[in-house]
Amino acid sequence: MLTILLIPKNGHNSIMKKILLGCIADDFTGATDLANNLVRSGMRVVQTVGVPDGPLDAEVDAVVVSLKSRTIDPQEAAAQSLTALKWLQDQGASQIYFKYCSTFDSTAQGNIGPVTDALMAALGTDFTIATPAFPDAGRTVFKGYLFVGDGLLNESGMQDHPLTPMTDPNLVRVLQAQTKHKVGLLDYKVIAQGRDAIQARITALREEGVGIAIVDAVSNADLMVLGSVFKDLPLVTAGSGVAIGLPANFGIAPNPHSAELPKPNGLKAIVSGSCSRATNLQVADFIARGLPAYALDPLSLMNGEQAIDDVLSWAKPKLANVPVLIYSTAAPDALKRIQDQLGVQQAGEMVEQAMARIAKGLIALGVGQLVVAGGETSGAVVQALGMHQLQIGAQIDPGVPWCAANGIHITLKSGNFGTPDFFTKAFDRIA
Ligand code: ADP
């Protein structure tokens, strides 16, 4: 008998475990949100930045490949998703999860429909489901209509989104405009009747030629039942909510080990390039505690590296004792003044790049526990630090877990997440 021993990249003589669930997310912080839900449900998860070019460094149950494909050309989004699919299949994934935003962010052309079509074709399946329901975050779907909190999607502010304005809350209509498959509805009347009724309705929908069913769900209990029904679907498409019902299909239950990360070490720092309301409160809370905070003036960045050197010289002696905060966070009127002076795009990129260089400098000074505030800022920091795979740990606040990569502990907080004490709470949680 010939036995082939697989020697993984890390050189250990063990057979690398196959992954169970392979996920493709259409943006970075959305990928973290999904990874966080899977970890809470008991899976060990790595999030990758883009499609890796080799096997993973760690043994995990699920991988979330984060793309930046939400608003790019639909064909390019499909092509990138197929590359991710191929890699996930090579790692052994037996089920694929396409993750989009819980507000179903898409344009008239897509990309939810075109990416779903491409994945269905590649997986050779004629049926999948679609639901952005995430009751923990106030997203529920009823009769095919998406609610955000107590109101409909098109009254939630999303109707004014600069890139993906959502003006129609009826997801059957929205998705039908983007896909070549017939879109149907798995109505709440059926969901309320439980597993067998749902299964029977799926069979009936398939017989009617429905290729994608929008699924109603208003509670976590609904998502748990649906998760068990979706067990044999090669492809699930959803926000992050459906993820809570899938790990049980693989015999996995919530457990403390799924969120285990290596022991944290190193000094503590926060860089904040987010101007969102929640972040403004978090900066104010940190300062009110008497902890050291440095307000980075975007105009000082015109002087090149000097501004970065000044920040790092300020931080160096303080870091030994307490966490330090470096922030460009500004209230709306101050932000507007800078943007008028430098241009919105230019100011944004300049501050992002500065924050990324500051993060790199802080790591060189011995920081090993880093909080980053801001979605775009997080992308710039992760890229500058050369992080390609993030192991997902425990949740600090909904949607925001600690992660580990390259020997560093890092958490990436998108603007409006987190309670006011987030910047100190994060370090308490990890300790
Ligand atoms: P959020 O998650 O809160 O939206 P992001 O990091 O995604 O945060 O976006 C904030 C944007 O604002 C980034 O491009 C950042 O560089 C920019 N920015 C931050 N502070 C300032 C400032 N004081 N003036 C101008 N632009 C800023």
Image (tube, grey):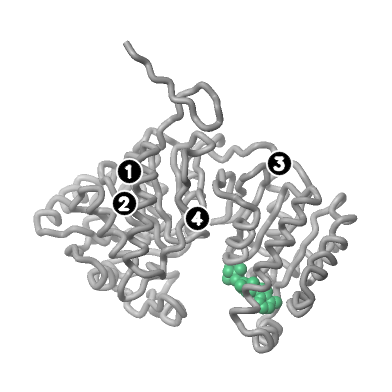
In which quadrant will I find the C terminus?
top right
Residue tagged by mark 2? 236
Kindly report the distance in space between the C-alpha atoms of the residues bearing marks 3 and 1: 33 Å
Mark 3 Cα-neighbour bin, 10 Å: few <14, some 14–19, many ≥20: some
Lower position in the chain sequence, tag 2 or tag 4:
4
* Residue receiving disc 1: 95
Q: Crowdedness of circle 1 by 10 Å Cα count: few (<14), some, many (20+)?
A: many
Image coordinates of residue 197 in percent, x first then y, are 19, 49
Examine the rendered structure and indicate whether residue 165 appears above or below residue 197.
below
Which residue occupies 21% across, 50% down? 198
Q: Position of residue 137 (x, y in %)?
A: 47, 62
Tell me: is circle 4 under 8 Å from ligand 1: no
Q: Amino acid at mark 4?
A: Asp
Q: Quadrant of the N terminus?
A: top left
Local SS, label 3: loop
Q: Is residue 32 above or below residue 94?
A: below
Q: CA distance from mark 3 to mark 2?
A: 35 Å
| Label 2 SS | strand
Q: Tell me the amino acid under the disc marked 3.
A: Pro
- Mark pair 2, 4: CA separation: 16 Å
Report helix, strand or loop for mark 4.
Answer: helix
Element class at badge 1: strand
Marker disc for residue 264: 3
Q: Earlier in the sequence, mark 3 or mark 4?
A: 4
Q: Is residue 254 left or right of residue 426?
A: left
- Quadrant field for ligand 1: bottom right
- Choose between 342 and 260: the one closer to the eye: 342
Residue at horizontal 86 percent and vertical 50 percent from the top: 320
Q: Position of residue 14 (x, y in %)?
A: 49, 23
